[in-house]
Image: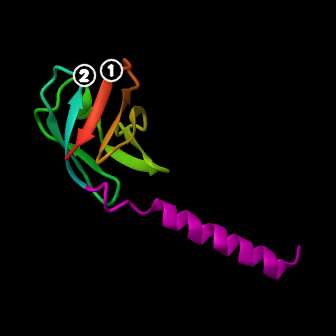
Amino acid sequence: MTKISSLALGAALALSTVAFAHADPAVTGTWKFTVGVNDAPCTLTLAEAGNATPSADCGSGLSSIGYWKSVGPSLQLYAPGGELVAWLKPKGEAYAGTRTSDGRRVELDR
């Protein structure tokens, strides 16, 4: 492979990686976040920069969410230290999945 084609390939890969790093505008904003079937929902705000801000009433370990990222159509929620808190998949206009610490069902809905 020539140097020019290597540079072109490297540039294309770098640009595609930057494109994946941008937040999906359909995901950003305020969501109702629920754990289990009997818990009252709290509010989780997902910012474009990847920050996640749970409301003060988010209990059940959800107050530890610090950031989020898209992985294909799925969402991953992380603690500030980098630990995966929950993995959610699209479910219509909502997202549903499980919390990694105990397997309880979690859901994000508008």
Determine whether the residue tagged by mark 2 lies in a helix, strand or loop.
loop
Whether the magenta-drawn stretch holds residue 74 is answered as no
- Percent position (x, y) of residue 59? 17, 26
Determine whether the residue tagged by mark 1 lies in a helix, strand or loop.
loop
Q: Quadrant of the N terminus?
A: bottom right
Q: Amino acid at mark 2?
A: Gly
Residue 21 marker: none
- Residues 37 and 25: in front is 37
Q: Residue furthest right?
A: 1
Q: Is residue 2 above or below residue 23?
A: below
Whether the magenta-drawn stretch holds residue 14 is answered as yes
Label 1 – label 2 distance at C-alpha: 6 Å
First of labels 1, 2 by sequence position = 2
- Residues 14 and 76: in front is 76
Residue 104 marker: 1
Span highlighted in magenta in the image:
1-28
The residue drawn where x is 11% and y is 36% is: 56
The residue drawn where x is 41% and y is 25% is: 100
Q: Which residue is mark 2?
A: 36
- Residues 18 and 93: in front is 93
The residue drawn where x is 12% and y is 27% is: 40
Q: Are marks 1 and 2 in contact (CB under 8 Å)?
A: yes
Taking 91 as reference, is 30 left or right?
left
Taking 109 as reference, is 5 left or right?
right
Mark 2 closeness class: few <14, some 14–19, many ≥20 residues within 10 Å: some
